[in-house]
Amino acid sequence: MTETVASIVAAHRAGTVSPAQTVARSFARIREHNDPAIFISLREEKEALAEAEALSAKDAAQLPLYGIPVAVKDNIDALGMPTTAGCPTFSYLPSHDATAVARLRAAGAIIIGKTNLDQFATGLVGVRSPYGIPNNPIRRDLIPGGSSSGSAVAVSAGLVPLALGTDTAGSGRVPAMLNNIVGLKPSFGMISTAGVVPACRTLDCVSVLSLTVDDAMTALAAMAGTDDADPFSRNRPLQQMTTFPANLRLGVPRSGQLIFFGDKASETAYGDALKRWTALGATLVEFDLEPFYETARLLYEGPWVAERYLVIRDLLASSPEAIHPVTREITIAGARPSAADTFAALYRLQALRQIAERAFAGINALVLPTAPTVYSTAQVLANPIELNSRLGTYTNFVNLLDFCGLALPAAIRTDNIPFGITLLAPAGQDAQLASIGRVFHADTKLTMGARSLPQPPLAALPAGLSGDEIAIAVVGAHLSGMALNGELKALGGRLLEQARTAPDYKLYALATTPPKPGMLRVEAGTGSSIELELWALSAGSFGKFVAAIPPPLSIGTIRLADGRGVKGFLVEPAAVNGARDISAFSGWRAFMADAAAG
């Protein structure tokens, strides 16, 4: 039975299972699981099946999420379903998809429904919703974790293989741990938050919940990329995963600095995880965790709560009873900080960021518990604010310090409670975390989610860069076997792979000698997917190559069909005036073959 994104896509492409059959299976499992608190709204099944059947007219090889059912946290807009953010009074019907959702659909995903959450994404517990509390499928007495509660439970229970959450202070990572699944918190700005109800706009990230690291990275690649609709979007090209490094160095807190609130089982599980890393060949290096704790205190004791207040202040004024009492108590505090308080906190945060950067000297990543302990629903309902705060011990500082994070299952304790660890690194290191995290997760041999599914063998990675190499995309005469390919080889260039661009480009035949194409970036989704090759050059050779490029060509960042960003050839817009548009050929090689035949 295919369950992971990778295996489902492979089955769809092979024709052994159809996308419609997979979508129908999701709806059947939702009915069978019978937990009405997981989804706030579901699509009409017939509509989702029709969308799945329509995929047969598309090129499956170009759709990395071909026919994958996806659940979306209900603070992220999905066309055709209301967005509630966990508050019925706040509900509205969006006019279009959030950018992240639109990119998933473009990659072949089928949106199934909108999932429950801690209201306005305020909480790590998953119990602050008027739509009910999703049952934790690992142990029903435990909280599901939040705020992305429904999304995490839907993946763990096998209702969908992939779900979107959000993560401002751990809302994607904590529920991932509690449900024995992977939670990916990408670098800030890597995934657009256009169409996402804000919690803290300067910190919010769309997160990914999945059964494996590879599945999470496939989804991240489909969504990553800049977006003019999001002023917080950043140009952070997603790198390619690599093999496990031979000299991995991981940061662990100094002795005595970790807090488990008396949970000896979690403390033991963390120690066992460190032993596993050592057995895998990692060197553990101590660092000072105290500045990170201080940063975490800024999140809720400082002015950032004001960002949450801004989102719902009108609702607080007009209908305070519509807001969950705990959410209301937390959010009202955001009206208190002054401008002076805000600047004082920003100054301190900047100093803490500098200290945090120094912690990474000679270290590839930090390894921390995802959460220090676990609580039952009854315990959290009896003490909602203090226990929620404890769960954020190792997550609250991450977005403030501009880290990326990857939450991984590490153990199922003897009391059948999941324990997880999180890898952290500076922004832009998402692929590095995935490269080492996937090996750790596989080495645990844990089953996936709540359905005791065995992990698949780790897929082989494509040949990657080494040393100081830089990848460059070529689309014209530098392609293998063509007129200028010898220039790349003379510089020691090495062919990495054949690939295609995202459908954001047009290709023109320029009036040059020898003939050359010019690739122009156009509005996302309005162009063609152009064939290209990726070559590796040493840093020195890359500089020589770029220096020799004549105008009107230049080197810019090209977005590939799988979401990665690479350096490559682009043409100045003025140079295509009067040039022939050859985009219909989908590549220079096909155009030249046609010209030779004609």
Image (cartoon, grey):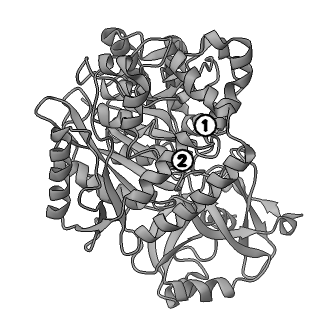
Q: Position of residue 180 (x, y in %)?
A: 27, 35
Q: Could you tell me how far apart the alpha carbons at marks 1 and 2 are, in whole angstroms?
A: 10 Å
Q: Quadrant of residue 304?
A: top right
- Determine whether, in the image, residue 203 is placed left or right of residue 422: right
Q: Quadrant of residue 337?
A: top right
Q: Note whether 322 is above or below 221 in the view shown.
A: above
Q: Residues within 10 Å of mark 2 (few under 14, many from 20)?
A: some
Residue under the point 65% across and 49% down: 503
Q: Position of residue 3 (x, y in %)?
A: 30, 32
Name the residue tied to disc 2.
298
Taking depth in this image into account, of 220 and 204 the one nearest to the observer is: 204
Q: Position of residue 151 (x, y in %)?
A: 43, 27
Is residue 466 at least partly visible in the picture?
yes
Q: Note whether 13 is above or below 46 in the view shown.
A: below
Q: Note whether 519 is above or below 149 in the view shown.
A: below
Position of the C terminus by quadrant: bottom right
Taking depth in this image into account, of 549 and 518 the one nearest to the observer is: 549
Residue under the point 47% across and 79% down: 469
Is residue 210 at least partly visible in the picture?
no
Residue 226's label in the rendered image is: none
Residue under the point 44% across and 37% down: 172
Name the residue tied to disc 1.
305
> Which label's residue is closer to the chain start, 1 or 2?
2
Q: Give the structural element (helix, strand or loop) at label 2.
A: helix
- Determine whether, in the image, residue 474 is placed left or right of residue 552: left
Q: Residues within 10 Å of mark 1 (few under 14, many from 20)?
A: many
Q: Position of residue 537 (x, y in %)?
A: 50, 81
